[in-house]
Image (spheres, rainbow, N blue to C red):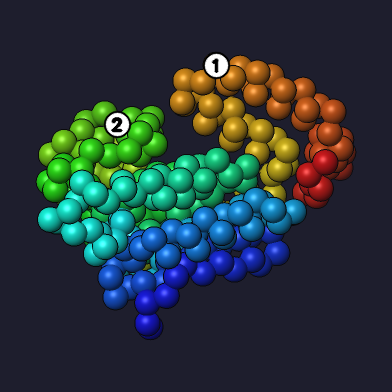
């Protein structure tokens, strides 16, 4: 497979963005990041979506920002890769929940793309590494915030300060991964994670995601978001459907209104 920009597919209520540059371990170029940002715009603008899956092809999930355009002799003249931060922030800010399917190892900014997703499923044998300090790069604020709020402090510091390469089992214990499976079981585990996301009431799911993220960021608006979401759910048609389905002992069919 030749290297191309990330691809977007929409299947019913699921959007899928797939990294398609296995020849460079899915390192993201400026063009890749622009395409990724456009895909996120389309996801935001498409009604009826319930979840996003971020995946990749090849041996590695993502090796971060493609530094091929950096000239070591003129590094100070090159603007920092803020496009990468914007893409990761964009994933995190989506109203719908996201699942990252890590079919291989992940490095550098690729770790932040994964952390920007709500759920991360990895495979046995994978590792994660953050070599930024090794080449003199201080991570951008969004990445450090996600590292600090999602990972055990010891794991975050091992990755960022020691530039350690961390095996899958430790990633699971430290909160980087939500599930760890054999490679052949990855698709099934992603599907198992998507099943409740597609079945649960979208107003409740999306409202609680927004509030949880705001609480994790320490934002003053978190309480307002949580209260608003709580009241909105009680004014929705979905709660009526949920109560009727519970009484009738059947599966609810939520419309997201």
Q: Give the secondary structure at mark 2.
A: loop
Mark 2 vs mark 1: which is more N-terminal? Answer: 2
How far, Cα to Cα, is label 2 from label 1? 24 Å
Quarter assignment of residue 181:
bottom left
Q: Mark on residue 152?
A: 2
Query: Dividing the picture into quarters, in which one does residue 208 lie?
Result: top right
For the point 86% across and 37% down, the residue is: 237
Question: Which residue in the structure is indicated by mark 1?
Answer: 220
Drawn side of residue 46 relative to residue 152, left or right: right
**CB within 8 Å, label 2 to label 1:** no
- Residue 170: percent from the left, percent from the top? 24, 44
* Label 2 vs label 1, nearer the camera: 1
Quarter of the rendering occupied by the C terminus: top right
The quadrant of the picture occupied by the N terminus is bottom left
In the rendering, at what x and y percent does residue 104 appear? 31, 63
Q: What element carries label 1?
A: loop
Could you say which is closer to the camera, residue 99 or residue 36? 36
Kindly identify the residue that appears in the image at 66 percent across and 33 percent down.
207
Direction from residue 75 to residue 233 in the image, left or right: right
**Vertically, is 211 above or below 221?**
below
Q: Is residue 105 visible?
A: no
Q: Quadrant of residue 32?
A: bottom left
Query: In the rendering, at what x and y percent does residue 177 appear?
Result: 36, 46
- Front one among 19 and 188: 19
Dot 1, crowdedness within 10 Å: few (<14), some or many (≥20)?
Answer: few
Residue occupying image coordinates x 66% and y 67%: 11
Q: Is residue 38 left or right of residue 202?
A: left
Q: In this view, does 99 lie to the left or right of 112?
A: right
Residue at horizontal 29 percent and vertical 67 percent from the top: 25
Residue 101 location in percent, x, y?
A: 43, 58
Q: Is residue 47 visible?
A: yes
């Amino acid at each position: 497979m030749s290297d191309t920009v990330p691809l977007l597919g929409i299947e019913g209520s699921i959007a899928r963005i797939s990294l398609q540059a296995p020849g460079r371990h899915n390192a993201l170029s400026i063009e890749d990041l622009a395409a990724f940002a456009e895909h996120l715009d389309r996801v935001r603008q498409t009604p009826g979506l319930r979840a996003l899956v971020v995946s990749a092809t090849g041996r590695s999930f993502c090796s971060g920002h493609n530094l091929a355009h950096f000239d070591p002799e003129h590094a100070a003249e090159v603007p920092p890769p803020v496009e990468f931060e914007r893409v990761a922030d964009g994933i995190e800010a989506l109203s719908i929940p996201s699942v990252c399917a890590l079919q291989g190892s992940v490095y550098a900014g690729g770790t932040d793309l994964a952390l920007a997703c709500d759920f991360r499923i990895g495979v046995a044998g994978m590792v994660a590494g953050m070599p930024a300090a090794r080449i003199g790069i201080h991570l951008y604020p969004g990445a450090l915030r996600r590292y600090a709020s999602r990972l055990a402090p010891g794991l975050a510091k091992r990755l960022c300060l020691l530039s350690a390469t961390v095996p899958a089992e430790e990633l699971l214990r430290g909160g980087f991964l939500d599930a760890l499976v054999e490679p052949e079981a990855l698709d099934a585990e992603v599907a198992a994670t998507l099943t409740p996301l597609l079945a649960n009431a979208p107003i409740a799911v999306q409202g609680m995601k927004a509030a949880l993220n705001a609480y994790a960021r320490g934002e003053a608006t978190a309480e307002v978001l949580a209260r608003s979401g709580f009241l909105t759910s009680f004014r929705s048609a979905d709660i009526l459907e949920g109560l009727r389905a519970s009484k009738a002992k059947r599966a609810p069919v939520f419309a997201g209104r």
